[in-house]
């Protein structure tokens, strides 16, 4: 099955992915820009929420782990890799950049192992490290297997010269394209001709059909096969500039009254096509005759694929602030970019791997184009967002349609995750009820914080339940231990103060009797769209959620009209049963 892996991609590659099993690798690793990348969430009105979550940091440091990986590369790596990484240490020193390159070299070596001989790899990076990464990839994949350095324009011009900028604006990313051999999958891609090109080169319009065409020379300078023969044309009566080919089976004897020309256009030239093809073109009305009777080939615009894709991509726009596909995830790339790469270097049914899958653009593009896929990410936040995206875009559900490995599967492993990292536990638990994470520490340390009127809230679910289209919210709180009835009462108060519809309290430990009693005091939420009552405060344990329990609420992705339709269908079904 298609698979998502949670965890460090280096051991996952080594332990779970076999040799020569992958057709295409795309990776968009952290760029070593020494910054933290935050996920900016928007409220229902489209405004940025005050809170945000640090998805990851790409500041790299030389640590004992880095030193151990470096030693492994130098002592156990292939000779070219060993000498390359040693030379880099001597050249640039033991610093953050080298730590980044060591991290990447170890993973790229594994990616070459898992790549099929006919496979390709695209490494997305920025100019701060692309020159070093190219040296690393030359050593691992071989300089002979370097194909292209693609420049993708990711932003518009920087107009900060007046603020003292003393260098050219950096508006492109680099995508390094390598193959694993001299024989690789290749499906050329094209972009449409621009209007200026069409006007200049396809200036003829065919009468009757309205099809645009250009005319190409049918002669050649050198002979090749059946290319030296008479091609006779007749002047159309009453005109001086229109000629038609004589398509009689005999091309040597003139028909009475016809004026023949163009046995060959001029001395020393030959036809570019055989006599058989010339007859075929003429009968298909693909030949245009000049005023002198010289035949030319009609090349129609609507039969041309367009301009072959070059190594500078300016036609794939970055994701704008208001773009429909924008998820708020840092470094999210446009779907069109990944679709182009996947269509170029794989075929339907091939296996695509993204070892830094983030919010899953590669995975979604592969699913859309009929490829198999594997994705790896080190944060539960990314895996959770990707699960939502697969459900919303394709109706795919984990365990039924694809596998997720590395997530807790039982109460013991969930408790271990909570002990190891309560923020990762929180993001994972929120994904069990499809809640969007909410809140961030204002200290910029990447920790989940509590601030503003949403104090104590870790996630939110939005649904529409009435004809006005006004969104309603379910506020979610996650607790990994030490729960008490006061926590439930506090959540009820927050639901009330925020005019939310429902509250969901997720707990690792079983709720106490007092907690359950406190939840019942919240009463019920009546759904106008579904004409049903839902408990306004619900307590769900991790054990229940792992067993398949769900929050009781109106469907979060339905509209009022869809709800009415579903409600009518449900009533009709009940009447049929009666």
Image (spheres, grey):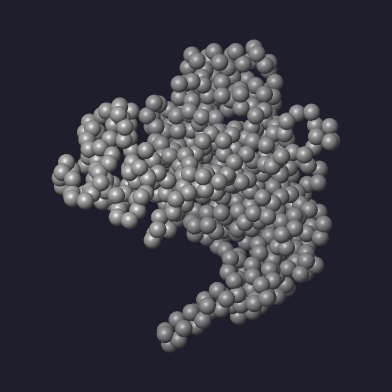
Quarter of the picture holding the C terminus: bottom left
Residue 560 appears anywhere in the view = yes
Instruction: Depth check: give the residue in front, 185 or 116.
Output: 185
From this viewpoint, is residue 505 visible? Answer: no
In percent of the image, x 56 and y 54: which residue is there?
389
The location of residue 375, given as percent across then percent down, is 51, 42
Q: Quadrant of residue 128?
A: top right
Q: How far across and down, in percent of the image, does residue 147 sit?
A: 48, 28
User: Residue 172: image x %, image y %?
Assistant: 64, 36
Q: Residue at x 49, y 79 (%)?
A: 570
Q: Residue at x 42, y 58 (%)?
A: 210
Residue at (54% x, 19% y) in the render: 73
Is 435 drawn above or below residue 220 in the view shown?
A: below
In the picture provided, is 314 more to the left or to the right than 369?
right
Front residue of this view, candidates 236 and 139: 236
Name the one closer to the observer, 114 or 91.
91
């Amino acid at each position: 099955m298609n698979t998502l892996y949670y965890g460090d991609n280096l051991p996952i590659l080594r332990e779970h992915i076999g040799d020569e099993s992958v057709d295409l690798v795309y990776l968009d690793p952290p760029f070593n820009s020494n910054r933290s990348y935050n996920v900016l969430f928007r409220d229902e009105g489209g405004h940025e929420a005050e809170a945000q979550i640090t998805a990851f940091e790409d500041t790299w440091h030389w640590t004992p782990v880095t030193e151990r990986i470096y030693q492994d590369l130098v002592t156990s790596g292939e000779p070219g890799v060993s000498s390359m990484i040693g030379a880099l240490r001597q050249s640039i020193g033991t610093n953050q950049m080298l730590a980044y390159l060591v991290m990447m070299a170890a993973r790229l070596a594994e990616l070459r192992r898992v790549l099929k001989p006919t496979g390709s790899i695209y490494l997305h990076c920025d100019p701060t490290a692309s020159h070093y990464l190219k040296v690393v990839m030359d050593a691992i994949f071989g300089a002979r297997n370097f194909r292209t350095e693609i420049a993708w324009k990711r932003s518009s011009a920087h107009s900060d010269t007046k603020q003292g900028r003393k260098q050219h604006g950096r508006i492109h990313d680099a995508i390094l394209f390598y193959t694993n051999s001299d024989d690789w999958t290749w499906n050329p891609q094209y972009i449409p001709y621009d209007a200026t090109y069409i006007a200049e080169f396809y200036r003829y319009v065919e009468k009757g059909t309205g099809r645009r065409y250009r005319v190409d020379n049918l002669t050649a300078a050198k002979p090749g096969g059946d290319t030296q023969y008479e091609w006779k044309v007749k002047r159309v009566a009453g005109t001086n500039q229109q000629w038609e080919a004589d398509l009689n089976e005999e091309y040597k004897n003139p028909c009475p009254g016809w004026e023949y020309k163009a046995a060959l256009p001029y001395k020393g030239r030959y036809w570019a096509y055989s006599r058989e093809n010339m007859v075929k073109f003429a009968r298909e009305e693909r030949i245009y005759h000049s005023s002198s009777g010289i035949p030319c080939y009609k090349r129609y615009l609507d039969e041309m694929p367009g301009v072959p894709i070059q190594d500078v991509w300016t036609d794939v726009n970055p994701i704008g602030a208001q773009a429909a596909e924008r998820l708020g995830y840092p470094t999210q790339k446009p779907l069109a970019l990944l679709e182009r790469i996947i269509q170029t270097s794989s075929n339907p049914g091939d296996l695509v791997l993204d070892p830094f899958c983030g919010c899953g653009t590669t995975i979604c593009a592969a699913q859309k184009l009929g490829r198999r896929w594997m994705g790896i990410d080190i944060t539960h936040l990314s895996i959770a967002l990707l699960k939502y995206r697969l459900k919303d875009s394709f109706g795919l559900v984990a365990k039924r349609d694809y596998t997720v490995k590395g997530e807790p599967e039982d109460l013991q492993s969930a408790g271990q995750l909570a002990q190891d990292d309560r923020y990762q536990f929180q993001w994972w638990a929120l994904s069990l009820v499809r809640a969007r994470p909410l809140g961030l520490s204002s200290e910029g340390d990447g920790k989940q914080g509590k601030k503003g009127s949403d104090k104590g809230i870790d996630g939110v679910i939005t649904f529409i339940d009435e004809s006005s289209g006004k969104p309603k919210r379910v506020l979610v709180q996650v607790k990994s231990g030490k729960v008490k009835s006061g926590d439930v009462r506090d959540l009820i108060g927050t639901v009330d103060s925020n005019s939310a519809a429902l509250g969901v309290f997720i707990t690792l430990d079983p709720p106490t009797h007092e907690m359950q009693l406190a939840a019942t005091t919240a009463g019920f939420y009546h759904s106008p769209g579904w004409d049903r009552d839902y408990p306004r405060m619900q307590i769900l344990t991790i054990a229940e959620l792992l067993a398949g329990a769900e929050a009781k609420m109106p469907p979060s992705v339905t509209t009022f009209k869809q709800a009415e339709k579903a409600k009518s269908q449900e009533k009709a079904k009940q009447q049929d049963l009666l």
